[in-house]
Image (cartoon, rainbow, N blue to C red):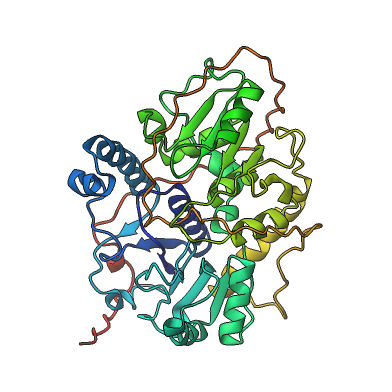
């Protein structure tokens, strides 16, 4: 079976690349073959062009940093994800695949306009939406009719956020299941298989641990700096434009740093997701980021699902737990395998690998419902460039001994994912396919 994946394609966002890899890898395992379709209009195929990045960042220095980082992201995709770029018209490949899967990220965000985001170029029976995210509280009135029509044409639709499920039902009258983000479809050990330490990272230098931060300006809030000083731990600030090595951290290195962090402080949805997958202590900071207008619904759904709502700060960025290094993952251990299996079942049914159940069960109810009253800008917007703020240098930690939680035992090793060798003309393999005539 041949499957194709459509998503937001960029080389500058950890969450975007990791959710793409996870869904691609899952489709490979279920169907036997998959590849990502990178439509030419989603981004110019000059991912580390110096002049383009200079225009975006405003300086040659920051442009050079960004070029190196994007090159690492591209190398990851070239290594692990089969991708097709030869797509001037998506309808030309409608007969090349048995199914087209759109997801996850913000594929149905009306502000993004992802090409083919409803797979409308393919016959309806081939269209699948997995964990599609709308990422806004309402569909603009001028697009509501279009969204309603295209969603109703898709035989298999699933949504990532509870708020999105309610929005689709209100818009179409159709009940759709809520499923987990693609990154949760892979187990922790599958992620550890591709993780690797950064070349600059020394276990000796960080033998007492470290606080890892992932904020889109590169600069953590003062509360995080104060917390790290209180714990006597050094900071590693991803996206820090004052630190070349930290800023250009690659995908595999990101996974390693999260997995070995004493504490992970972030505003990132996918950063939070990997803290949960890898079972590392974390804090979600509810920051307001000016022009970015997002809601906290996806964080709220995620934290409630695993019974960890207290890991989000209040509106003043004050933490709610007494000891941030202590965290109870028992609810996560109970819920995640169930939700992973249920989400995989959705894909199996959609791909014709399993008969549908009588009714789709709702996503697991958390033990406690906590209302979070402030909207949070959603980080997984690859089209937004990180703000150019200068970060403070790493703090000078004092030699205070800190008791850190024991490292979680790693389960038995799993087979490492195969690296991808891009074929010259992959769609020509197997039986011949008749091309669909492009509409004039």
Residue positioned 74% across, 63% down in the render = 364
The quadrant of the rendering that contains the C terminus is: bottom left
The quadrant of the rendering that contains the N terminus is: bottom left
| Closest to the observer, 391 or 102 | 391
Residue pushed farthest left?
51
The image position of residue 316, as x and y in percent, is: 64, 45
The image position of residue 194, as x and y in percent, is: 48, 39
| Closest to the observer, 372 or 363 | 372
Residue pushed farthest right?
367
Residue 305 in the image: above or below residue 233: below
The image position of residue 32, as x and y in percent, is: 47, 61
Residue pushed farthest top?
399
Does residue 353 appear in this view?
no
The image position of residue 279, as x and y in percent, is: 66, 40
Horizontally, residue 307 falls left or right of residue 245, namely right
Does residue 238 appear in this view?
yes
């Amino acid at each position: 079976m041949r499957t194709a994946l459509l998503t937001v394609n960029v080389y500058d966002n950890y969450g975007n690349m990791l959710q793409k890899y996870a869904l691609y890898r899952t489709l490979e395992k279920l169907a036997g073959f998959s590849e990502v379709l990178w439509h030419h209009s989603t981004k110019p195929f000059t991912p580390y062009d110096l002049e383009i990045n200079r225009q975006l960042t405003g300086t040659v220095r920051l442009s050079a940093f960004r070029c190196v980082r994007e090159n690492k992201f591209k190398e990851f995709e070239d290594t692990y994800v089969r991708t097709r770029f030869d797509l001037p018209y998506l309808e030309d490949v409608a007969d090349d695949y048995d199914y087209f899967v759109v997801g996850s990220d913000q594929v149905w965000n009306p502000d993004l306009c992802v090409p083919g985001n409803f797979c409308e170029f393919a016959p309806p029976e081939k269209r699948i939406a997995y964990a599609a995210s709308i990422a806004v509280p309402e569909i603009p009135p001028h697009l509501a009719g279009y969204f309603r029509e295209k969603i109703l044409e898709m035989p298999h639709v699933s949504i990532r956020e509870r708020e999105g499920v309610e929005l689709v039902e209100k818009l179409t009258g159709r009940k759709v299941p809520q499923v987990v983000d693609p990154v949760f479809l892979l187990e922790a050990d599958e992620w550890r298989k591709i993780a690797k330490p950064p070349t600059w990272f020394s276990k000796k230098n960080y033998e007492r641990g470290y606080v890892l931060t992932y904020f889109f300006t590169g600069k953590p809030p003062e509360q995080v700096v104060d917390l790290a000083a209180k714990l006597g731990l050094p900071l590693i600030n991803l996206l820090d434009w004052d630190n070349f090595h930290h800023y250009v951290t690659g995908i595999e290195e990101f996974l390693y740093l999260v997995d070995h962090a004493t504490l992970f402080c972030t505003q990132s949805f996918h950063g939070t997701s990997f803290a949960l997958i890898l079972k590392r202590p974390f804090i979600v900071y509810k920051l307001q980021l000016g022009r970015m207008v997002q809601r906290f619904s996806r964080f709220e759904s995620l934290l409630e699902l695993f019974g960890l709502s207290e890991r989000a700060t209040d509106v003043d960025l004050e933490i709610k737990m007494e000891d941030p290094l202590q965290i109870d993952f028992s609810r996560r251990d109970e819920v995640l395998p169930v939700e992973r299996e249920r989400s995989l079942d959705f894909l199996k049914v959609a791909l014709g690998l399993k008969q549908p159940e009588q009714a789709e069960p709702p996503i697991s109810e958390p033990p406690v419902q906590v209302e979070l009253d402030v909207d949070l800008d959603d980080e997984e917007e690859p089209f937004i460039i990180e703000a150019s703020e200068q970060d403070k240098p790493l703090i000078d930690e004092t030699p205070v001994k800190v008791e850190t939680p024991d490292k979680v035992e790693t389960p038995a090793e799993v087979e490492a994912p195969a690296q991808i060798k891009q074929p010259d003309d992959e769609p020509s393999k197997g039986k011949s396919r008749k091309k669909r005539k492009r509409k004039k």
